[in-house]
Image: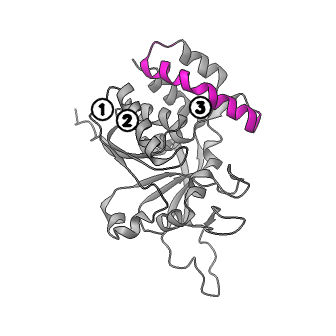
Amino acid sequence: MGEAPARKKIIIDTDPGIDDALAIFVALNSPEIEVVGLTTIYGNVYTTLATRNALHLLEVAERSDIPVAEGSHVTITAIQLDPEFPRKIGQIVILGGAFSVNGNVNPAAEANIFGDPDAADIVFTSGSDILAVGINVTHQVVLTDEDLNQLAHSKAKFAQYVCKILGVYFSYHHEAYSMQGVYLHDPTALLAAVDPSLLTYTEGVVRVQTSGITRGLTLFDNCKKKYGELNEWLHKPKVKVAVTVAAPAVVRLVMDRLMQE
């Protein structure tokens, strides 16, 4: 028998966050990967609280051996501080963007990109191996009331914990989207890193609008047309953008790994 494939080492950049908590728990119960650290950033909450929440989740998981590094409290162009960064890492999986659909902060912008459009544009054009998982995909992945009921009947530690925090998330989705369920944004992006075959992708150039009414808009160029004049899209590196997802498989994996005792 051959040797088992090496576990993929990942760092989770997070602002927990309810579905961030689900993603972290799923990651810790994913044998394919090794979580070597968490980094924190502002978004759902301020950076200091994100750090506190991340440390708390690791305590719940009894994984306080995993280090947590606190990120910036303000907008920052991270990659500009270290131009070699794109060549130091394997891949960046981004939960962010709304490709050819409305955003969730406003009709133009998705929340993570809207939080720092300038930094997002730098990352998308950095030359790193990038996979963007936008809400055009994550809105297909829904945890239902029945799924929540199954979690509630599980004796697993993670299942019991998430049931305590999911109530407010379900209430928000009912109010904002008139739906009986919640979108699994972060867990979908996490599982894209674990098993890329769960999604399909297209490749092209992504730029981010950094000002005006469409600030935070992610625009995808499929690079199939050669334009006659110079523009700000030319000679930019291509990235992968998720276009479809095996939603039932993703939900099943999330459920199984949250209920793993």
**Cα distance, mark 1 to mark 2?**
7 Å
- The answer to whether the residue labelled 1 contacts the one labelled 2, judged by CB atoms less than 8 Å apart, is yes
Q: Can residue 249 be seen in this snapshot?
A: yes
Q: Residue at x 23, y 36 (%)?
A: 2
User: To which residue does mark 2 refer?
Assistant: 55
The image shows residue 250 at horizontal and vertical percentages of 54, 34
Circle 1 SS class: loop
106 left or right of 13?
Answer: right
Nearer to me, 81 or 90: 81
Instruction: Write down the residue under mark 1.
Output: 64
Q: Dot 2 lies on which element?
A: helix
Amino acid type, label 3? Pro
- Residue 213 in the image, given as x and y percentages of width and height: 72, 65
Q: Which residue is mark 3?
A: 248
Between discs 2 and 3, the one toward the N terminus: 2
**Against 172, is 69 above or below?**
below
Q: Earlier in the sequence, mark 3 or mark 1?
A: 1
